[in-house]
Image (cartoon, rainbow, N blue to C red):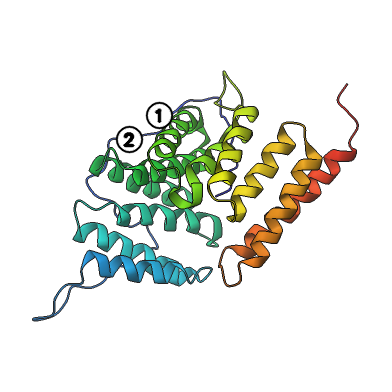
Amino acid sequence: MLLVLAIAVSCAPALRAPPKAAPAPAGAEPAPSAPRGGEAAPSAAALLEEARTRFARRPDVEQVRKAEALFLAAAAADPSGVDGLAGAVETRIWRIDHERGADRGALAASALDAGQACVARAPASARCDYALALALGMQARERRGTALDGLKKMVEHLRRAAAAEPTLDDAGPARVLAIVLVRAPAWPLGPGDPEAGLEAARRAVALAPAYPPNTLALAEALVATGSPAEGRAAAERGVALARARTGDPDAPEWIRDGEALAARAAQAEVAPPPP
């Protein structure tokens, strides 16, 4: 996930009272209908499997909407499970970034609701900490007045997730932490720390070296810390890794991001030093 981070003058609280449920936002697919007669209701496991199958069909927006509804149905079918709520966060974030005409503010709020509901269900779950961190980042982008509080909480949840389950989502906690630390403003406005971001990116690559976004996060961190030549080489490696992932629905986006990052790094290589 790529974040555009900004700090506003105001400082609204990032979190609200945890919701009792994670309702679907406006425009989402309705939940699967109840079975008729003697038909057995689908199990949470079956709903999750179908949701993942649908989500894998992105960038088809209708399939992602169906996946979101199925993830929520799985969360309702298993009141102690967290995968449905975490999946709802993921699909809602995808919709914000890819669905034309989506109500981005409503989707960001509903992603946050699902993330908070996940943590309320399982306070020690790395998956829930990670999901809530992603939702906080998206809310910070869509409601900039929450960024000051939200980014701080985001970093806390990412570090908890990284400590508990470092390989989650192909080293996602370390990868996203790296992006936040590189892009966010530094103290006192935010948690930004490019050197710490570089360390987090190196951890992500060490944990999952074949996953292209980890190498792209490392490339960005290298550029941000004054090593544009190394950053360009890392961006080019990330593009090569993405090109090798035939059939991955996210690969085209990674390739575009990596090529843009390589070009930015190349410009930084020839830019005059700051006075």
Residue reaching furthest to the left = 38
At x 31%, y 65%, the residue is: 48
Query: Number of labelled discs?
Result: 2
Whether pointer 2 and pointer 1 mark residues with C-beta atoms closer than 8 Å, the reply is yes
Amino acid bearing label 1: Pro
Could you say which is closer to the camera, residue 248 or residue 191?
248
Q: Quadrant of the C terminus?
A: top right
Residue reaching furthest to the front = 206
Quarter occupied by residue 109: top left
Left or right: residue 204 versus residue 40 is right
* Residue 116 x/y as whole percent: 32, 41
Residue reaching furthest to the top = 188
At x 24%, y 53%, the residue is: 81
At x 58%, y 55%, the residue is: 211
Q: Residues within 10 Å of mark 1 (few under 14, many from 20)?
A: few
Amino acid bearing label 2: Arg
* Residue 122 x/y as whole percent: 25, 42
Vertical placement of residue 273 versus 208, above or below: above
> Disc 1 designates what residue?
13
Circle on res. 16: 2
* Residue 212 x/y as whole percent: 62, 55
Left or right: residue 183 versus residue 167 is right
Vertical placement of residue 33 versus 84, above or below: below
